Amino acid sequence: MPDARVALVTGANHGIGAATAKALAARGTGVLCAYFRHEHLGGLQDPALPAAYRATRMARADNVAQSIRAAGGRATALEADLSDPASVPHLFDVAEAELGPVSILVNNASGWVADSFAPDTTNRFGLAQAPVSAQTVDQVFGVDARAAALLIAEFARRLVDRGGEWGRIIGLTSGEANGFPEEISYGAAKAAQVNFTLGAATELARFGVTANVVHPPMTDTGWINQRTASAAQSAGHRIATPRQVADVIAYLASDAAELVTGNVIRLR
């Protein structure tokens, strides 16, 4: 029997976020598909990236929400710049007005940029990378760390205020504590997000909230070309599909995962 729960999924216009929105909706969950389009986020100005990937990243999430509704689900889309703290309560306000109180939060959005302490202008995959700078650090931390923390805080405040006794928080990470060469700011920001999420797992447990972080393998969201695929496979890395990752996230958002909390779940 479908539930009446509501999820807020960030970065839901493409890749893992879009697949997660659809996977949750298929289980009866209403979904607010949050997204933000900007040509400088995700290194989209790099000509080495496939044109189809750039087009997907710049697409509106309305198409995702529409496909969910066409399948009989509940969904709406909202564009919001998560680097602006004012966007956080607005997302929850819209979700509550159109779908209901948010009980599932998926922190998937990223301000990703490839940056490095080394002088190289391209990484091992032939993609452009910039030197670590105030701009690269702020761009990634503003979304992957600060926004994730503010979203968790807003989620928790509203759940407690309404007397909620059930909730799910799921984050996405890569690199984190071990460092992330050639994606320095991204790895550091994800380490911060992991810390925020695992802290929430402890602090919010008494309110029926679980909080976990998913660490996917390399995932083909459209940016992988023959060179990156060959490099990954030669290093023994598996390439996942967004749907495979989304299925794990949907499980963590379910009643079946009530005993799973405070974990970084590494997918292989």
Image (cartoon, rainbow, N blue to C red):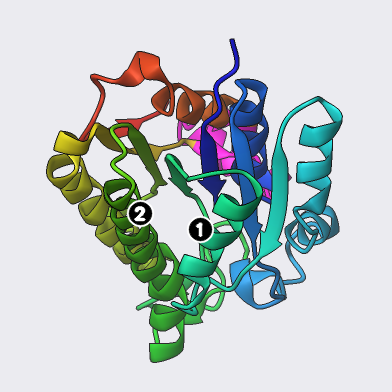
Q: Where is mark 1, residue-wise?
A: 92
Q: Is residue 230 left or right of residue 168?
A: right
Q: Does the magenta stretch include residue 122?
A: no
Give, as a single range, the part of the protein colored magenta: 218-242
**Structural crowding at the residue carrying mark 1, measured as other residues with C-alpha within 10 Å and reported as few (<14), some (14–19) or many (≥20):** many
- Between 181 and 8, the residue placed more toward the observer is 8
Q: Do the residues labelled 1 and 2 touch (CB within 8 Å)?
A: yes
Residue drawn where x is 39% and y is 49% of the image: 174
Residue 43 in percent (x, y) is at: 63, 70
Observer-nearest residue: 55 or 29? 29
| Amino acid on which disc 2 is placed | Arg
- Front position in the image: 140 or 160: 160
Residue at 37 percent of width and 53 percent of height: 155
* Residue that carries the numbered disc 2 in the rendered image: 158
Mark yes or no: residue 89 visible.
yes
Please identify the residue farthest to the front as the structure is shown: 162
Taking the magenta stretch, the answer to whether it contains residue 238 is yes
Say which residue appears at 38% left-offset and 72% top-offset: 141
Whether residue 113 appears in this view of the structure is no
Numbered badge on residue 52: none
Residue 135 versus residue 237 in the image, above or below: below
- The one nearer the camera, 253 or 157, is 157
In which quadrant of the rendered view does residue 93 lie?
bottom right
Q: Is residue 210 left or right of residue 131?
A: left
Residue 251 higher or lower than 13, as above or below: above
